[in-house]
Image: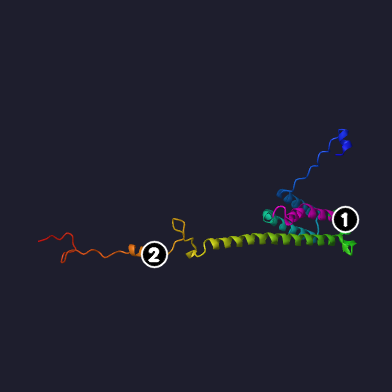
Amino acid sequence: MGLWDWLRGEQDPPPADVPAAPTEADVVASLDGVATSLREAHASPLVTSRVARIDRLVRACLPRLASLGLGSADAYAVVATATSYLPEAVAGYLRLPRDWADTRPIDEGRTALMVLVDQLELLGATMTKVLDAVNRSDAQALIAHGRFLEARFHGADGGGLGLDPSGTPEGPPSSDTARRAAPGPKPSGPSGASANSLDLEP
């Protein structure tokens, strides 16, 4: 607000509302809407098969976006593909008369159908790369956990942890311990005495 606006008593306009980030439910609803519009329009299999592939890849990425970081470029690409890039591309094609869109060249010899197919191929390739990045991130976490376990319990026999009640790894008994644990010779009785405790002296 400028000085003259302040002197005239004018107030700053309220800040514009910032739309909330799409939720997982919003993403799924957008994908469902695209599929419904294609089904109702009886779209070409060239389109529906590619959209189905993108749909499948996006849904596979959704539960694992945290592995990429919710603010990462890959996470943004997944959400934007489902809620913006894909719906807008499909809607632009469906607004055109079918025969005209599928037969009339509009861009360097390509029809509207071919233009849409190229866009869908690009989106599908991008989602494939994102899903691969998610899988690699999870695989690296598994490898790191395995290395931690190896370092923590290295040398344990038989796959066990080898811990005694005190929490320390068990080791072989010492020679002194083994000597104390070994049974000694039985004491012998008087010479010529019977081993039977019920024998009576004459």
Q: Residue at x 74, y 51 (%)?
A: 32
Label 2 belongs to which residue? 174
| Place of residue 96 in the rendered image (x, y in percent of width and height, measured from the top left) | 87, 55
| Place of residue 12 in the rendered image (x, y in percent of width and height, measured from the top left) | 83, 38
Q: Amino acid at mark 1?
A: Pro
Is label 1 or label 2 in front? 2
Which mark identifies residue 135?
none
Residue 132 located left or right of residue 3: left
Rate crowding at label 1 as few (under 14), some (14 to 19) or many (20 or more) other CA atoms within 10 Å: few
Label 1 belongs to which residue? 97
Classify residue 178 by image quadrant.
Answer: bottom left
Tell which of 18 and 104 is nearer to you. Answer: 18
Classify residue 61 by image quadrant.
Answer: bottom right
Tell which of 191 and 96 is nearer to you. Answer: 191
Q: State whether the magenta stretch is mostly helix, strand or loop.
A: helix
* In the image, residue 127 above or below residue 6: below
| Residue 7 visible in the shown view | yes
